[in-house]
Image: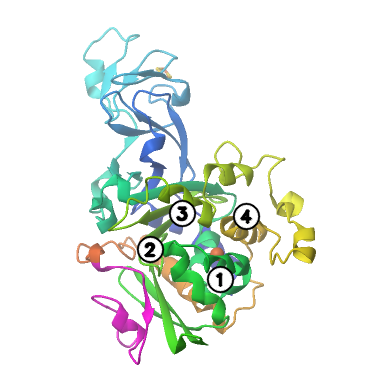
Amino acid sequence: MLNNESNARMCRVGGDQPMGIALRHYWLPVLLADELVAGADPMQVELLGERLVAYRDASGQPGLFSEACLHRGASMMLARAEPEGLRCIYHGWKFAVDGTVLDTPNVADPRFKDRIKGRVYPVREAGSLIWAYLGPKDQAPEFPRWPWMDLPDAQRLVTRHVQECNFVQVIEGLVDSSHLGLLHMNGLKASSDVDLGYAQKIHSMQKNLAPQLDADDTDFGFYYAALRDIDDGAGARTEARVAAFVAPCIVLNPNGDIATLSVPLADHKTAFFHVFWSTKEDINREPLRSRQLEFVGLTPQILDGFGLTDATLGRADRPSSRNHFMQDRAAMRERGSWSGMPGLIEEDVAVSVSAGPLRDRSQEVLSSADIGMVRLYRALLACADAAQNRQPPLGISRDIDWSRVVGVNGVLNGRGWRDLVPAYAKRSEAGG
Ligand code: FES
Ligand SMILES: [Fe+2]
Protein backbone atom coordinates (compact mmCIF):
# COMPACT_ATOMS: atom_id res chain seq x y z
CA MET A 1 0.00 0.00 0.00
CA LEU A 2 1.19 3.50 -0.79
CA ASN A 3 -0.39 6.74 0.28
CA ASN A 4 -1.44 9.09 -2.49
CA GLU A 5 1.53 11.37 -2.01
CA SER A 6 4.10 8.57 -2.38
CA ASN A 7 2.12 7.12 -5.28
CA ALA A 8 2.26 10.40 -7.17
CA ARG A 9 5.94 10.74 -6.30
CA MET A 10 6.63 7.30 -7.79
CA CYS A 11 4.53 7.71 -10.92
CA ARG A 12 4.68 11.30 -12.19
CA VAL A 13 7.22 11.64 -14.97
CA GLY A 14 7.30 15.38 -15.77
CA GLY A 15 10.59 17.23 -15.57
CA ASP A 16 9.53 19.06 -12.39
CA GLN A 17 8.65 15.85 -10.49
CA PRO A 18 11.12 13.77 -8.40
CA MET A 19 10.53 10.62 -10.50
CA GLY A 20 10.68 12.67 -13.68
CA ILE A 21 14.07 14.03 -12.63
CA ALA A 22 15.23 10.49 -11.82
CA LEU A 23 14.05 9.18 -15.20
CA ARG A 24 16.08 11.90 -16.92
CA HIS A 25 19.25 10.20 -15.66
CA TYR A 26 18.84 7.18 -17.95
CA TRP A 27 19.08 6.25 -21.60
CA LEU A 28 15.58 5.17 -22.64
CA PRO A 29 14.35 3.59 -25.89
CA VAL A 30 12.02 5.74 -27.97
CA LEU A 31 11.44 3.78 -31.18
CA LEU A 32 12.30 0.57 -32.94
CA ALA A 33 15.20 1.31 -35.28
CA ASP A 34 13.12 0.04 -38.22
CA GLU A 35 10.38 2.57 -37.54
CA LEU A 36 12.70 5.43 -38.40
CA VAL A 37 13.37 5.29 -42.12
CA ALA A 38 16.15 7.39 -43.66
CA GLY A 39 14.78 10.52 -45.31
CA ALA A 40 11.15 9.65 -44.49
CA ASP A 41 8.67 12.05 -42.88
CA PRO A 42 9.41 13.16 -39.30
CA MET A 43 7.73 11.09 -36.57
CA GLN A 44 5.90 12.38 -33.52
CA VAL A 45 7.38 10.91 -30.36
CA GLU A 46 6.51 11.40 -26.69
CA LEU A 47 8.89 10.64 -23.86
CA LEU A 48 8.56 11.59 -20.18
CA GLY A 49 5.80 14.01 -21.05
CA GLU A 50 7.92 15.86 -23.64
CA ARG A 51 6.70 16.35 -27.20
CA LEU A 52 9.47 15.35 -29.58
CA VAL A 53 10.07 14.73 -33.26
CA ALA A 54 12.27 11.92 -34.53
CA TYR A 55 13.98 12.04 -37.91
CA ARG A 56 16.60 9.96 -39.68
CA ASP A 57 18.59 11.87 -42.27
CA ALA A 58 19.51 10.50 -45.66
CA SER A 59 22.88 9.30 -44.39
CA GLY A 60 21.10 7.15 -41.78
CA GLN A 61 21.84 9.24 -38.68
CA PRO A 62 18.89 9.30 -36.24
CA GLY A 63 17.92 12.50 -34.46
CA LEU A 64 15.43 13.64 -31.84
CA PHE A 65 14.20 17.27 -31.81
CA SER A 66 12.02 19.19 -29.41
CA GLU A 67 8.77 19.59 -31.27
CA ALA A 68 8.85 23.38 -31.05
CA CYS A 69 11.11 25.00 -33.65
CA LEU A 70 14.02 26.83 -32.09
CA HIS A 71 12.99 30.05 -33.82
CA ARG A 72 9.37 30.73 -32.91
CA GLY A 73 7.98 27.39 -31.94
CA ALA A 74 6.17 26.10 -35.03
CA SER A 75 5.87 22.33 -34.89
CA MET A 76 8.78 20.46 -36.39
CA MET A 77 6.23 17.78 -37.30
CA LEU A 78 5.33 20.12 -40.15
CA ALA A 79 8.97 20.46 -41.22
CA ARG A 80 10.22 19.52 -44.65
CA ALA A 81 12.26 16.32 -44.67
CA GLU A 82 15.49 17.14 -46.49
CA PRO A 83 18.49 14.83 -46.93
CA GLU A 84 20.68 16.75 -44.43
CA GLY A 85 17.98 17.48 -41.85
CA LEU A 86 14.60 19.06 -41.08
CA ARG A 87 13.59 22.47 -42.43
CA CYS A 88 10.85 24.35 -40.58
CA ILE A 89 8.16 25.48 -43.02
CA TYR A 90 7.54 28.80 -41.24
CA HIS A 91 10.80 30.70 -41.99
CA GLY A 92 12.88 27.90 -43.45
CA TRP A 93 15.39 27.38 -40.66
CA LYS A 94 17.09 24.07 -41.24
CA PHE A 95 18.55 21.79 -38.58
CA ALA A 96 20.82 18.76 -38.80
CA VAL A 97 20.08 15.83 -36.47
CA ASP A 98 23.03 16.84 -34.25
CA GLY A 99 21.52 20.30 -33.76
CA THR A 100 23.76 22.15 -36.21
CA VAL A 101 21.80 24.99 -37.79
CA LEU A 102 22.38 24.62 -41.52
CA ASP A 103 20.37 27.52 -42.89
CA THR A 104 18.39 30.58 -41.74
CA PRO A 105 17.21 31.99 -45.08
CA ASN A 106 15.21 34.90 -43.58
CA VAL A 107 18.26 36.28 -41.74
CA ALA A 108 20.67 38.37 -43.80
CA ASP A 109 23.73 37.69 -41.62
CA PRO A 110 25.16 34.36 -42.87
CA ARG A 111 27.09 33.87 -39.60
CA PHE A 112 23.96 34.09 -37.40
CA LYS A 113 23.31 30.38 -37.79
CA ASP A 114 26.76 29.54 -36.41
CA ARG A 115 25.91 31.18 -33.09
CA ILE A 116 22.82 29.08 -32.33
CA LYS A 117 22.14 25.37 -31.89
CA GLY A 118 18.97 23.36 -32.56
CA ARG A 119 17.12 21.78 -29.61
CA VAL A 120 18.06 18.14 -30.02
CA TYR A 121 18.65 15.32 -27.57
CA PRO A 122 21.49 12.78 -27.64
CA VAL A 123 20.44 9.56 -29.36
CA ARG A 124 22.03 6.15 -29.85
CA GLU A 125 21.11 3.26 -32.07
CA ALA A 126 21.74 -0.12 -30.42
CA GLY A 127 20.03 -3.49 -30.19
CA SER A 128 17.57 -2.60 -33.00
CA LEU A 129 16.29 0.29 -30.88
CA ILE A 130 16.72 4.07 -30.93
CA TRP A 131 17.63 5.35 -27.46
CA ALA A 132 17.51 8.88 -26.11
CA TYR A 133 18.79 10.73 -23.08
CA LEU A 134 16.66 13.66 -21.90
CA GLY A 135 18.68 14.83 -18.89
CA PRO A 136 21.29 17.59 -18.52
CA LYS A 137 23.75 17.20 -21.38
CA ASP A 138 26.84 17.20 -19.16
CA GLN A 139 25.46 14.43 -16.95
CA ALA A 140 24.67 11.74 -19.55
CA PRO A 141 25.61 8.35 -18.08
CA GLU A 142 27.66 5.78 -19.87
CA PHE A 143 25.48 3.98 -22.40
CA PRO A 144 24.65 0.53 -20.93
CA ARG A 145 25.90 -2.13 -23.30
CA TRP A 146 23.74 -5.23 -22.94
CA PRO A 147 25.02 -8.51 -24.46
CA TRP A 148 21.90 -8.81 -26.65
CA MET A 149 22.91 -5.61 -28.42
CA ASP A 150 25.94 -7.37 -29.88
CA LEU A 151 24.02 -10.23 -31.53
CA PRO A 152 23.28 -10.13 -35.27
CA ASP A 153 19.90 -8.53 -36.12
CA ALA A 154 18.59 -11.92 -37.22
CA GLN A 155 18.96 -13.27 -33.67
CA ARG A 156 17.06 -10.44 -32.00
CA LEU A 157 13.35 -9.66 -32.30
CA VAL A 158 12.02 -6.35 -30.98
CA THR A 159 8.47 -5.04 -30.66
CA ARG A 160 6.81 -1.92 -29.29
CA HIS A 161 3.25 -1.32 -28.25
CA VAL A 162 1.56 1.47 -26.34
CA GLN A 163 -1.01 1.43 -23.56
CA GLU A 164 -2.96 4.03 -21.65
CA CYS A 165 -1.68 3.75 -18.09
CA ASN A 166 1.20 4.80 -15.93
CA PHE A 167 4.48 2.94 -16.47
CA VAL A 168 4.59 1.43 -12.97
CA GLN A 169 1.39 -0.52 -13.68
CA VAL A 170 3.07 -2.16 -16.64
CA ILE A 171 6.16 -3.14 -14.64
CA GLU A 172 4.06 -4.56 -11.81
CA GLY A 173 2.90 -7.43 -13.98
CA LEU A 174 6.51 -8.38 -14.66
CA VAL A 175 7.45 -8.94 -11.00
CA ASP A 176 4.25 -10.78 -10.13
CA SER A 177 4.84 -14.46 -10.78
CA SER A 178 1.61 -15.72 -9.23
CA HIS A 179 -0.64 -14.11 -11.84
CA LEU A 180 0.81 -16.26 -14.60
CA GLY A 181 -0.92 -19.51 -13.70
CA LEU A 182 -4.24 -17.70 -13.21
CA LEU A 183 -4.62 -14.79 -15.63
CA HIS A 184 -2.68 -16.62 -18.35
CA MET A 185 -4.08 -20.07 -17.55
CA ASN A 186 -5.23 -20.78 -21.10
CA GLY A 187 -1.93 -19.68 -22.64
CA LEU A 188 0.06 -21.82 -20.23
CA LYS A 189 -2.10 -24.85 -20.97
CA ALA A 190 -1.61 -24.32 -24.68
CA SER A 191 2.15 -23.98 -24.19
CA SER A 192 2.51 -27.74 -23.64
CA ASP A 193 1.91 -28.32 -27.34
CA VAL A 194 4.05 -25.49 -28.65
CA ASP A 195 7.52 -26.31 -29.85
CA LEU A 196 9.06 -22.97 -28.89
CA GLY A 197 11.73 -22.32 -26.27
CA TYR A 198 9.55 -19.57 -24.83
CA ALA A 199 6.56 -21.87 -24.38
CA GLN A 200 8.58 -24.70 -22.85
CA LYS A 201 10.11 -22.43 -20.23
CA ILE A 202 6.79 -21.13 -18.91
CA HIS A 203 4.81 -24.35 -19.12
CA SER A 204 5.26 -25.70 -15.61
CA MET A 205 4.11 -22.50 -13.88
CA GLN A 206 0.54 -23.77 -14.06
CA LYS A 207 1.50 -26.67 -11.78
CA ASN A 208 1.83 -24.52 -8.66
CA LEU A 209 -0.34 -21.44 -8.38
CA ALA A 210 1.10 -20.14 -5.11
CA PRO A 211 4.85 -19.86 -5.57
CA GLN A 212 7.09 -19.00 -2.68
CA LEU A 213 8.60 -15.58 -3.35
CA ASP A 214 11.84 -13.91 -2.37
CA ALA A 215 13.78 -10.80 -3.41
CA ASP A 216 17.10 -9.05 -2.86
CA ASP A 217 17.95 -5.39 -3.42
CA THR A 218 20.90 -4.75 -5.72
CA ASP A 219 22.86 -1.80 -7.10
CA PHE A 220 20.68 -1.79 -10.21
CA GLY A 221 17.28 -2.54 -8.62
CA PHE A 222 16.41 -6.00 -7.30
CA TYR A 223 16.28 -9.68 -8.06
CA TYR A 224 12.87 -11.32 -7.70
CA ALA A 225 12.61 -15.08 -7.27
CA ALA A 226 9.57 -17.35 -7.55
CA LEU A 227 10.05 -20.89 -6.28
CA ARG A 228 7.56 -23.62 -7.17
CA ASP A 229 7.49 -27.03 -5.59
CA ILE A 230 6.24 -29.29 -8.34
CA ASP A 231 5.42 -32.98 -8.18
CA ASP A 232 4.24 -34.27 -11.53
CA GLY A 233 5.13 -37.25 -13.72
CA ALA A 234 8.70 -35.92 -13.95
CA GLY A 235 9.25 -36.25 -10.18
CA ALA A 236 9.31 -33.90 -7.19
CA ARG A 237 11.47 -30.81 -7.58
CA THR A 238 11.66 -27.08 -6.88
CA GLU A 239 11.72 -24.88 -9.96
CA ALA A 240 13.01 -21.34 -9.59
CA ARG A 241 12.34 -18.37 -11.82
CA VAL A 242 14.43 -15.28 -11.10
CA ALA A 243 13.76 -11.91 -12.75
CA ALA A 244 15.99 -8.85 -12.51
CA PHE A 245 14.39 -5.42 -12.20
CA VAL A 246 16.80 -2.83 -13.54
CA ALA A 247 15.89 0.74 -12.66
CA PRO A 248 14.04 2.59 -13.86
CA CYS A 249 11.95 0.37 -16.15
CA ILE A 250 13.71 -2.76 -17.43
CA VAL A 251 12.82 -6.31 -16.38
CA LEU A 252 14.98 -9.18 -17.49
CA ASN A 253 12.57 -12.10 -17.72
CA PRO A 254 13.46 -15.38 -15.98
CA ASN A 255 13.37 -17.11 -19.36
CA GLY A 256 16.86 -15.66 -19.75
CA ASP A 257 16.37 -14.38 -23.29
CA ILE A 258 13.76 -11.63 -22.96
CA ALA A 259 14.07 -8.03 -21.79
CA THR A 260 11.03 -5.83 -21.35
CA LEU A 261 11.27 -2.04 -21.15
CA SER A 262 8.24 -0.10 -19.87
CA VAL A 263 8.98 3.44 -20.94
CA PRO A 264 6.86 6.36 -19.69
CA LEU A 265 5.66 8.47 -22.59
CA ALA A 266 3.54 10.59 -20.26
CA ASP A 267 1.96 10.17 -16.82
CA HIS A 268 -0.82 8.02 -18.27
CA LYS A 269 0.80 6.49 -21.31
CA THR A 270 3.50 3.87 -21.61
CA ALA A 271 5.46 2.29 -24.44
CA PHE A 272 6.16 -1.37 -23.79
CA PHE A 273 9.17 -2.75 -25.64
CA HIS A 274 9.93 -6.47 -25.85
CA VAL A 275 13.40 -7.65 -26.82
CA PHE A 276 13.64 -11.39 -27.52
CA TRP A 277 17.00 -12.86 -28.43
CA SER A 278 18.65 -16.17 -29.15
CA THR A 279 22.33 -17.02 -29.17
CA LYS A 280 21.61 -19.92 -31.53
CA GLU A 281 18.61 -19.30 -33.77
CA ASP A 282 17.51 -16.65 -36.24
CA ILE A 283 14.37 -15.80 -34.30
CA ASN A 284 13.95 -12.60 -36.31
CA ARG A 285 13.53 -14.64 -39.52
CA GLU A 286 10.52 -16.62 -40.68
CA PRO A 287 9.05 -18.95 -39.65
CA LEU A 288 10.37 -18.43 -36.11
CA ARG A 289 9.55 -14.72 -36.00
CA SER A 290 5.83 -15.12 -36.67
CA ARG A 291 5.50 -18.18 -34.47
CA GLN A 292 7.03 -16.37 -31.51
CA LEU A 293 4.97 -13.22 -32.04
CA GLU A 294 1.77 -15.21 -32.44
CA PHE A 295 2.33 -17.23 -29.29
CA VAL A 296 3.03 -14.15 -27.16
CA GLY A 297 0.39 -12.05 -28.91
CA LEU A 298 2.58 -9.37 -30.45
CA THR A 299 1.80 -9.62 -34.17
CA PRO A 300 0.93 -6.33 -35.89
CA GLN A 301 -2.62 -7.63 -36.41
CA ILE A 302 -3.12 -8.35 -32.71
CA LEU A 303 -1.67 -5.01 -31.61
CA ASP A 304 -3.80 -3.17 -34.13
CA GLY A 305 -6.94 -5.11 -33.18
CA PHE A 306 -6.53 -4.44 -29.46
CA GLY A 307 -5.76 -0.74 -29.93
CA LEU A 308 -2.12 -0.95 -28.89
CA THR A 309 -0.48 0.94 -31.77
CA ASP A 310 0.09 4.68 -32.13
CA ALA A 311 -2.66 4.78 -34.73
CA THR A 312 -5.26 2.78 -32.80
CA LEU A 313 -4.69 3.72 -29.14
CA GLY A 314 -7.85 5.24 -27.65
CA ARG A 315 -10.04 4.54 -30.67
CA ALA A 316 -13.68 3.93 -29.73
CA ASP A 317 -13.84 0.76 -31.83
CA ARG A 318 -10.98 -0.88 -29.94
CA PRO A 319 -11.03 -2.62 -26.53
CA SER A 320 -10.73 -0.21 -23.61
CA SER A 321 -12.10 0.45 -20.12
CA ARG A 322 -15.15 2.05 -21.74
CA ASN A 323 -16.28 -1.24 -23.29
CA HIS A 324 -14.88 -3.68 -20.71
CA PHE A 325 -12.08 -4.51 -23.13
CA MET A 326 -14.68 -6.31 -25.27
CA GLN A 327 -14.37 -9.23 -22.89
CA ASP A 328 -15.89 -12.38 -24.36
CA ARG A 329 -18.22 -13.56 -21.59
CA ALA A 330 -19.68 -16.33 -23.75
CA ALA A 331 -16.20 -17.78 -24.18
CA MET A 332 -15.79 -17.67 -20.39
CA ARG A 333 -19.09 -19.43 -19.78
CA GLU A 334 -19.04 -21.93 -22.59
CA ARG A 335 -15.61 -22.38 -24.09
CA GLY A 336 -13.19 -22.70 -21.19
CA SER A 337 -11.74 -19.20 -21.44
CA TRP A 338 -10.52 -17.94 -18.05
CA SER A 339 -10.26 -14.26 -18.88
CA GLY A 340 -12.42 -13.75 -21.94
CA MET A 341 -9.38 -12.15 -23.58
CA PRO A 342 -7.85 -13.60 -26.73
CA GLY A 343 -4.22 -13.95 -25.58
CA LEU A 344 -1.40 -13.18 -23.15
CA ILE A 345 -0.76 -9.57 -24.12
CA GLU A 346 -4.43 -8.64 -24.20
CA GLU A 347 -4.83 -10.17 -20.74
CA ASP A 348 -1.93 -8.14 -19.34
CA VAL A 349 -3.12 -4.93 -20.97
CA ALA A 350 -6.71 -5.38 -19.77
CA VAL A 351 -5.76 -5.87 -16.13
CA SER A 352 -3.14 -3.12 -15.99
CA VAL A 353 -5.18 -0.50 -17.86
CA SER A 354 -8.48 -1.41 -16.17
CA ALA A 355 -7.01 -0.32 -12.81
CA GLY A 356 -7.16 3.27 -14.10
CA PRO A 357 -4.62 5.54 -15.79
CA LEU A 358 -2.79 6.02 -12.49
CA ARG A 359 -4.04 3.39 -10.12
CA ASP A 360 -4.87 4.21 -6.51
CA ARG A 361 -2.46 2.23 -4.35
CA SER A 362 -3.81 3.61 -1.08
CA GLN A 363 -6.68 1.12 -1.22
CA GLU A 364 -4.88 -2.05 -2.27
CA VAL A 365 -4.55 -5.09 0.00
CA LEU A 366 -1.17 -6.68 -0.55
CA SER A 367 -0.37 -10.26 0.46
CA SER A 368 2.64 -12.56 0.57
CA ALA A 369 2.12 -12.96 -3.18
CA ASP A 370 3.00 -9.28 -3.71
CA ILE A 371 6.56 -8.88 -2.49
CA GLY A 372 7.52 -7.82 -6.01
CA MET A 373 5.26 -4.77 -5.63
CA VAL A 374 6.84 -3.79 -2.34
CA ARG A 375 10.34 -4.05 -3.81
CA LEU A 376 9.33 -2.18 -6.91
CA TYR A 377 7.79 0.71 -4.98
CA ARG A 378 10.84 0.85 -2.74
CA ALA A 379 13.32 0.83 -5.63
CA LEU A 380 11.46 3.49 -7.60
CA LEU A 381 10.97 5.73 -4.59
CA ALA A 382 14.68 5.36 -3.83
CA CYS A 383 15.36 6.65 -7.36
CA ALA A 384 13.03 9.61 -6.82
CA ASP A 385 14.63 10.39 -3.44
CA ALA A 386 18.14 10.19 -4.89
CA ALA A 387 17.25 12.48 -7.79
CA GLN A 388 15.68 15.02 -5.48
CA ASN A 389 18.86 14.99 -3.39
CA ARG A 390 20.95 15.44 -6.56
CA GLN A 391 22.40 11.95 -6.22
CA PRO A 392 22.57 9.41 -9.04
CA PRO A 393 19.64 6.98 -8.84
CA LEU A 394 19.91 3.17 -8.86
CA GLY A 395 21.76 1.64 -11.78
CA ILE A 396 23.82 4.74 -12.63
CA SER A 397 27.26 3.38 -11.90
CA ARG A 398 30.28 2.54 -13.97
CA ASP A 399 30.85 -0.50 -11.79
CA ILE A 400 27.85 -2.49 -12.97
CA ASP A 401 28.77 -5.23 -15.44
CA TRP A 402 25.59 -5.40 -17.54
CA SER A 403 26.68 -8.66 -19.09
CA ARG A 404 26.23 -10.32 -15.69
CA VAL A 405 22.79 -8.91 -14.92
CA VAL A 406 20.38 -11.59 -16.13
CA GLY A 407 17.09 -13.36 -15.59
CA VAL A 408 17.45 -17.10 -14.97
CA ASN A 409 15.41 -20.23 -14.36
CA GLY A 410 16.29 -23.71 -13.20
CA VAL A 411 15.69 -26.64 -10.90
CA LEU A 412 17.21 -26.01 -7.49
CA ASN A 413 18.26 -29.56 -6.52
CA GLY A 414 19.13 -28.52 -3.02
CA ARG A 415 20.79 -25.25 -4.08
CA GLY A 416 19.47 -21.79 -3.25
CA TRP A 417 18.03 -19.56 -5.99
CA ARG A 418 20.94 -17.16 -5.63
CA ASP A 419 23.26 -19.91 -6.85
CA LEU A 420 21.55 -19.70 -10.25
CA VAL A 421 22.49 -16.04 -10.70
CA PRO A 422 25.99 -15.35 -12.06
CA ALA A 423 28.06 -12.78 -10.16
CA TYR A 424 25.36 -12.58 -7.59
CA ALA A 425 25.54 -9.33 -5.64
CA LYS A 426 23.13 -7.99 -3.07
CA ARG A 427 23.08 -4.28 -2.27
CA SER A 428 23.64 -5.02 1.38
CA GLU A 429 24.03 -8.33 3.18
CA ALA A 430 21.98 -7.08 6.10
CA GLY A 431 19.25 -5.70 3.88
CA GLY A 432 18.46 -9.09 2.17
S1 FES B 1 9.33 29.12 -36.44
FE1 FES B 1 10.59 27.71 -37.42
S2 FES B 1 11.76 28.90 -38.80
FE2 FES B 1 10.53 30.31 -37.77
FE1 LIG C 1 1.16 -11.28 -17.49
For the rendered model, the colour scheme is rainbow
Along the line of sight, the residue nearer the viewer: 23 or 399: 399
Does label 4 point to a residue whose CB lies under 8 Å from ligand 2? no
Question: Where 25 sits versus 234, above or below?
Answer: above
Residue 261 percent location from the top left of the image:
42, 56
Q: Can you identify the residue that label 2 sits on?
A: 247
Q: Amino acid at mark 1?
A: Leu
Residue 161 percent location from the top left of the image:
51, 47
Q: Quadrant of the C terminus?
A: bottom left
Residue 156 percent location from the top left of the image:
34, 50
Q: Amino acid at mark 3?
A: Gln
Q: CA distance from mark 3 to mark 4?
A: 29 Å
Number of marks present in the image shown? 4
Question: Where 92 sits versus 419, above or below?
Answer: above
Q: Can you identify the residue that label 4 sits on?
A: 357
| Mark 3 burial class by Cα count in 10 Å: few <14, some 14-19, many 20+ | many
Dot 3 falls on a residue whose secondary structure is: helix
Is 329 left or right of 356, judged from the image as shown?
right
Along the line of sight, the residue nearer the viewer: 246 or 73: 246
Does label 1 point to a residue whose CB lies under 8 Å from ligand 2? yes
Dot 2 falls on a residue whose secondary structure is: loop
Q: CA distance from mark 4 to mark 1?
A: 23 Å
Which residue shows up at 74% across the image and 50% down it? Answer: 322
Q: Can you identify the residue that label 1 sits on?
A: 180
| Mark 4 burial class by Cα count in 10 Å: few <14, some 14-19, many 20+ | some
State the extent of the magenta-drawn residues as a range: 404-432
| Mark 1 burial class by Cα count in 10 Å: few <14, some 14-19, many 20+ | many
